[in-house]
Amino acid sequence: MNSTKFTPRTKEEIDRKWWEIGDYFRRNSLWMLMYCTGCCAIELPPAMTSVYDMERLGMGPMATPRQADVLLVTGYLSLKTLRRLIYTYEQMSEPKYVVGFGSCTINGGIYHDSHAVINRLDQYIPVDTYVAGCMPNTESVMNGFVDLMELMKTKKADGWKRYHEHYDWYKENQKAALGEVEVHDEFHE
Amino acid sequence: MTNSMNNVHEINNLMGQNFSLVDARILDAYQVSYELEKEDIHRALTVLKNAGFRQLSYLSCVDWPEEDVIEMVYIVMNWEKALHVQLHAKIDRNNPVMDSVLPIFPGAKYYEREAHEFFGVSFPGNKDHEKQLILENWDDMPPMRKDFDPRAYSDRKFTKRPMKRDYEIQDASSNKEREIKREARANALRTGGKE
Amino acid sequence: MILSLVIGFGVALGGFAFQTALGGVNRKIVARLQKRVGPRWYQEFLDIFKLLSKRSVSHGWIFDFGVIMALGGIIGTAMFMPVTENIVAFPNFDNFFIFVYLLAVGMLGMAMSASGSGNPLASVGVMRALTTMVAYEIPFMIVVLTIIKLAGTSSVSGIASFQQLAENNWFMIALPFGFVVAVLSLMGMLGKKPFETYIAPAEIASGPMVEYGGKQLGMLFIMHEITVFIEVSLFVHLFLGGAENIGMFVLKYFLVYASLNLISNVNGRFKIDQVVVFFYKWPLALAIGQAIIAIYLGWVI
């Protein structure tokens, strides 16, 4: 039998309750960054338009990394794109999520033996969930989004926390593959 | 048809009179191909540019490791006569140096940068030809050469995901027959049934 | 005094809640037009609260201060807005020119903080916003000055009750050219297509809002919703005769906002020079013509 006296909750419980409320808002209004990295980006317009409407889940496209929640890495990542993608990922405001589209982010896909395409995305930035396929079907894409929302509900989508905790490991991997992460090209100089 | 064949013969006469050609081929009504010595390329490009071929369509290389040469390919196009002329020149593979055609065609700047980056050909006369264009921080041999192994590079530099192989090929020989038949069919289609 | 403040805050908060809900409903209407299902009706609330719960990056004190100034200014402006004849927070202070002045505070705050962020795209966006403001203000001002001359008072609730007298028509019918000009100016004020140049997502990466994330963006969204509430309410009071009770006000507001949304849904986006040239051609001519007809010739329907 519960006692009827007022029991003050601990700070962790209050924080957890706030975080759950915040999670409800965050998972019902995900804003994705329209950064279409590779060929799998062509699966995004069918997901946004009539039949498989993405807006009823609350997702919508946003223009800049600072305003977006989800970074959709659609397709293969060449070395040049990976440098700029790391810039973009570190600019986003937290909490932020990454979804890897297509087989090229899982194990390299059909470009696995190329000299300019990386093979495993989660060595360089933390990935929350993958959508497999080459290209994935549009229903798989919607399923992937719903899976991401489920992960957010059960508090397993903590890629951004992992990036903070294992920052040195990620940086080491990035340097090993890229040489250096700074971008030096004719437009920046 | 006859109009363009007239153009082709015209160009054939022009080139044959002025240069010592190693090889001359008419590919179809719109494309002609000549092979020259390396020193004649600049003069040939100037002559062609004065004859109306004012667009440099392409500049690239073909790598022949067995013969130890790199073949430079220049394709120029004439807008009035609708004719492409290909010029080939073979240069030494171990020390590939080719004078830049930048004074004749200024648009060759980026083509020469790409040829330097991917094949290792240097172009004295093009002061930007060693700046990186497509690859950044490249640390290996020029990647389009035929003895570059992209798979070995990829295995060395990028970590792979460990996958387990949970299937096995039951009977390798039954596939072999199908493969032979498929190869024969492909050959027949490729050569028009002659072989 | 305290009662006025409480009513004022109530108007601002109620206006914000009403406009946010209406924004979600309008997204649903537009989606149904495009044969989609559309988001939930409370989707805009979820967006704003999601933004307020993210950690954000700050670019200096002027960046934060500009946003707070914009939000505070706009809440202060909304407190003066009369809703019906009875729900007016400060009965003698709802002059039209007070609204025009105080709306500029919001724009100024956003301009200040956008230039404090250091991104050149933000400066481009702010410049475009101010240019658009120069374009739509002049025809709108001419029409409103005509209305003030005809109604004899420049108080917004005074104009609304002038239209509710028995022998007067609403100014929508009495000044038809002026009504058309005001609709175009209202679309420019709200930033709806085709006058969406200053936000222009994916062209200048949403203009002044390019460097905002998290809490500042949430505050900017709240500011935008309250701005829309103020402007459409002004339009309802000036041209549609105000409202006798809350139900009529809600109905008129909804009709105006929904039709504007539907019009803007089928349009592309102008370039900034096209916006200025557009507003200085026919709307200006119609506004001046309407002023001459109504004041000097006296032909009011």
Image (cartoon, rainbow, N blue to C red):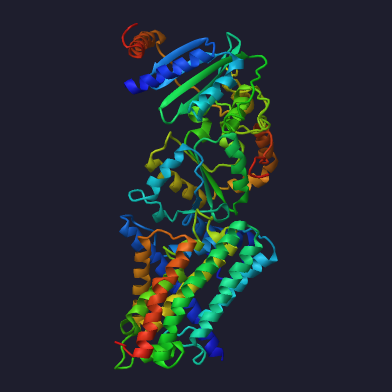
Asked if residue C208 is positioned above or below residue B60 in the image, the reply reads: below
Q: Nearer the viewer, residue C149 or B126?
A: B126
The residue that appears at 58% across and 19% down in the rendered structure is B41
Left/right placement of residue B118 relative to residue B52 reads right
Asked if residue C66 is positioned above or below residue B128 in the image, the reply reads: below
Residue A9 visible? The answer is: no
Asked if residue C80 is positioned above or below residue A101 in the image, the reply reads: below
The residue that appears at 42% across and 21% down in the rendered structure is B31
Q: Nearer the viewer, residue C252 or C95?
A: C95
Left/right placement of residue B166 relative to residue C265 reads right
Quadrant that contains the C terminus of chain B: top left
Quadrant that contains the N terminus of chain B: top left
Left/right placement of residue A101 relative to residue B179 reads right
Asked if residue C239 is positioned above or below residue B58 in the image, the reply reads: below
Residue C159 visible? The answer is: yes
Q: Position of residue B42 (x, y in %)?
A: 59, 21
The residue that appears at 52% across and 19% down in the rendered structure is B87
